[in-house]
Amino acid sequence: MNAVQYPKLKITAERLSIDPQQVPRHIAIIMDGNGRWAQKRDMPRAIGHQQGGRIVERIALDCVDLGIEVLTLYSFSIENWKRPQAEIDALMHLYSEYLVGIRPTLQRNNVKLVHLGRISQLPDSVQTDLNDTIKFTADNTGMILALALNYGGRSEIADAVREIAAEYKKGSLALDQIDEQCVTDHLYTAGLRDPDLLVRTANEMRISNFLLWQISYSEFYVTETLWPDFKKADLEKAILSYASRDRRFGAVKPSSAS
């Protein structure tokens, strides 16, 4: 457990009347509903994305206060390139703006930014701002904010397999060394624990190619709340729902084994 975050996690557990072990250490969120939020208000979709960006910073800080160790946000999928070019251009501009603007907040709150996805396919300006923010926060020791930007779960696994095959061909990896841990160590999330809780907003009941390997035993929580309306209270509802689950990881309770 991250020693920096643990005292906050204990306070959260006491306030929510749950055991510290019942607070998820890694929360992953599929942020959905920006476009619908804007359309409900007769606004351009870009306005919804702007509001969604503001919520990203707020929820990240809420997770810091709650003692969460890792927060992973699904920001832009590989499939999102199929959207109208004007919307993509607006999103990429927002990402650059956000990545630069959030640096003082990340530094002030000891948050480390990491990236999940294929960075080389992003516009040069976004690559530069993303890499600079990663370097800027590299020495921070508090919560890890993992931004899944140009991410796809299948692509991640394919990239891991490609790297493993290259190492095997080179002779630096033996066939009997290729196991589940080996695959895990070659994913974009290498070094991060798997998500304990996966949250999806806007009442969508699908995974959308997100963390396919890592969510094998994650608990799911779906809310009707659109991402731009998502608040700390919604996050705490998700945590309380998680705390009520019986996580067995494929096993059975001793009392039920007979």
Image (cartoon, rainbow, N blue to C red):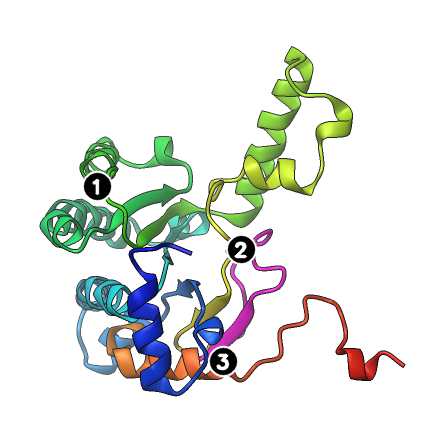
State whether residue 217 appears in this view: yes
The structure residue drawn at horizontal position 52% and vertical position 55%, both measured from the top left corner, is: 194
Mark 1: secondary structure: loop
Query: Badge 2 is on which residue?
Result: 209
* Residue type pointed to by label 3: Ala
Q: Is residue 207 above or below residue 10?
A: above
Mark 2: secondary structure: loop
Percent across and percent down for residue 222 are: 47, 78
Q: Is label 3 or label 2 in front? A: 3
How far, Cα to Cα, is label 3 from label 2?
26 Å
Q: In the drawing, what numbered circle is on residue 243? A: 3
Q: Nearer the viewer, residue 225 or 38?
A: 225
Q: Nearer the viewer, residue 41 or 254?
A: 254
* Residue type pointed to by label 1: Thr
Do the CB atoms of the residues marked 3 and 1 lie less than 8 Å apart? no
Query: Badge 1 is on which residue?
Result: 137
Q: Of callouts 2 and 1, which one flags the residue occurring earlier in the amino acid sequence?
A: 1
Position of the N terminus by quadrant: bottom left
